[in-house]
Amino acid sequence: MPTSIINHQKLNIILILVLIILSFFSLFIGTVAFSPSDVFLALIGQADDTTTIIINELRLPRVLLGALAGATLGLSGASLQGMLRNPLADPGIIGVSASAGLGAVMAIYFGLSEIFPAAIQLMAIAGALVATFILVIVAARESSVLTLILAGIGISSLATAAISLVMNFAPNPMTLQDMVMWMLGSLENRTSADISLSLPFIIIGWVLHIGISHGLDASSLGDDAARSLGIDTKKMQLKIILGGAISVGAVVAVCGTIGFVGLIVPHIIRRIIGYRPSQLLIPSALMGAILLISADLLTRIPMGHGQLRLGVVTAIIGAPAFLYIIYKTRRAMR
Amino acid sequence: MNRLAIKNISVTLDNNDILKDVSFDLPRGKLVGLIGPNGAGKSILVRSILGLVENAQGQILLDDKNLSDFSLKEKAQHISYAPQGAPVHWPLNVDHLVSLGLIPHLSPWQSLSLEQNNLIQKALQKTDVLHLSNRCVTTLSGGERARVMLARAMVTGSQYLLADEPTPALDPYHQIKIMEILKELAWANHGVLVVLHDLNMAHKYCDQLILLNDGIIISQGTPNEVLTDQNLSDAYQIKVHRIKNNHETFLIPTALN
């Protein structure tokens, strides 16, 4: 059944075009409406001051961050699913998202962000790095793929429990609300400062994913067979875990926890180009970016009270879509 | 000498001696059968030869060169491996699956050349599954799948092939097909080691046999030298009834007591 509809190069070109059009479109959607020419003039610095500020300092960072975050989640989801040979894996399963969340919640609890503006983000990155460190120790030992998944679940559960503990003792309702809002994820009011804080980690994470293609494909046959094909499986696993943890940690640090993108995107791509793990990487990154920017557009729809949060949108749309896909692919995955 | 020389392999896991001082040669041009009862240590011996068992002691020489001096990739170019059970974790297409056998010849960025695509076709042809090349591996029967997995191991074109039970639960026709493919590979000057349970297949097709029991080689040599009443009763706790027909001997096993 799963023969590909189109090849992955054609798919990449289509996805890049969609991403560009969608990004441009999302620049003129918002409380203030702009014409395409206003947006274009602002981008080249020729528009009036208000327009330039709204486009270049509010909406552009938001789109860029959405693309970076979505791409990171999609890439990491695809590589983790390939490496763990498990279609249920996503960046959340290795415990990094929850640990980054714990760092952020602790920063809010101790009021660190009032002392130092980037405290939440930095604490979140620190939380992600602690989780990464534990995972790398587990991965570097003689351990199976299953052990890694279980260790990730363990770290994730512990971090989630600690988050609940911190929330439990939140000093006042305002702090608690800040924590919950942060956990729900958002791209709102993100600035170029958020991008410059997270970009180095995101790039390091992406770079670590270079050169893993053959290893991921060979892993389809199991670790023994992959090693017999000349793949240093241990090194590959370390690169994927470290790369995923660092980049996803940075994304969670500036956007909050955004579920389901990393899980669902590889499944969408498999429906289009088939199951070879190596060919899912770049399309999954592009599709992740598209999905997150689209979800962010939905959060701009005015609601009765307050605003729809990004993490809520991705989960509300992601979960049913996920159910549909696993229903459609139930025979192939047997 | 053109051979894989296995010298004094020992493996201890959790204070249990799994393999004790195992030595034998796998010459090019020969089909060597590795036989023995369940739990004798056959699979772990094959995995030790490939360097997949972390605390295996001993030495492997490939054409008189120490295998531990080879990089993972060089090793993969010289020895290919068809693991037991042959798991495939994604529903890949047959031609993609077989193409994985060419990874040892690719640099990280390289994709398959036209010539390498022809190699895949040839391997599929040799194992008689060319007509399945666009099928998904999850839709194959046991016999088809076993031949596809063999094509995957053969496409590498390495001098040595280690196949761990390539005929699991196959009907007689498909067992014979697999053994004939391996035999042809040996005739084409490859060294082939095959783990087998069927004594008649071992007797009929293998040039040499290695009988492993409790981690020790209790006999090695030609099939007639190895498959003696004494050896079979020692290793398998069976006696065999032998039927001679023209030049062939058939072994019918019965339990000892």
Image: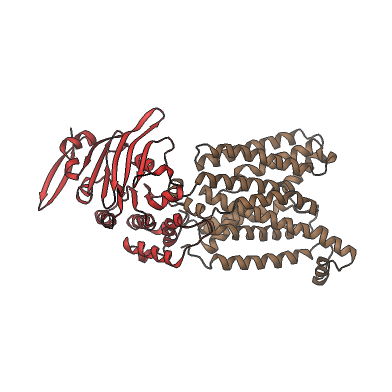
Residue farthest to the top, as pictured: B15
Residue farthest to the bottom, as pictured: A37
Location of residue A63 (image quadrant): bottom right
Q: Is residue A311 above or below residue B9?
A: below
Q: Nearer the viewer, residue A15 or A303?
A: A15
Q: Nearer the viewer, residue A195 or B32?
A: B32
Number of marks drawn: 0
Quarter of the image for the C terminus of chain B: give it.
Answer: top left
- Residue A9 percent across, percent down from the top left: 57, 66
- Residue B47 percent across, percent down from the top left: 38, 42
Location of residue B41 (image quadrant): top left
Q: Which residue appears at 50% of the width and 52% of the height?
A: A215
Q: Does residue B124 appear to the left or right of A3 in the view shown? A: left
Residue farthest to the right, as pictured: A49
Which of the colour schemes (rainbow, by chain, secondary structure, one colour) is used? Answer: by chain
- Residue A193 percent across, percent down from the top left: 80, 51
Q: Is residue A225 visible?
A: yes
- Residue B84 percent across, percent down from the top left: 36, 46
Q: Which residue appears at 41% of the width and 63% of the height?
A: B135
Colour-to-chain, red: B
Q: Does residue B82 appear to the left or right of A116 in the view shown? A: left
Location of residue B11 (image quadrant): top left
Q: Nearer the viewer, residue A62 or B54?
A: B54
Q: Is residue A153 visible?
A: no
Q: Does residue B63 appear to the left or right of A274 in the view shown? A: left
Colour-to-chain, brown: A
Q: Which residue appears at 38% of the width and 58% of the height?
A: B155
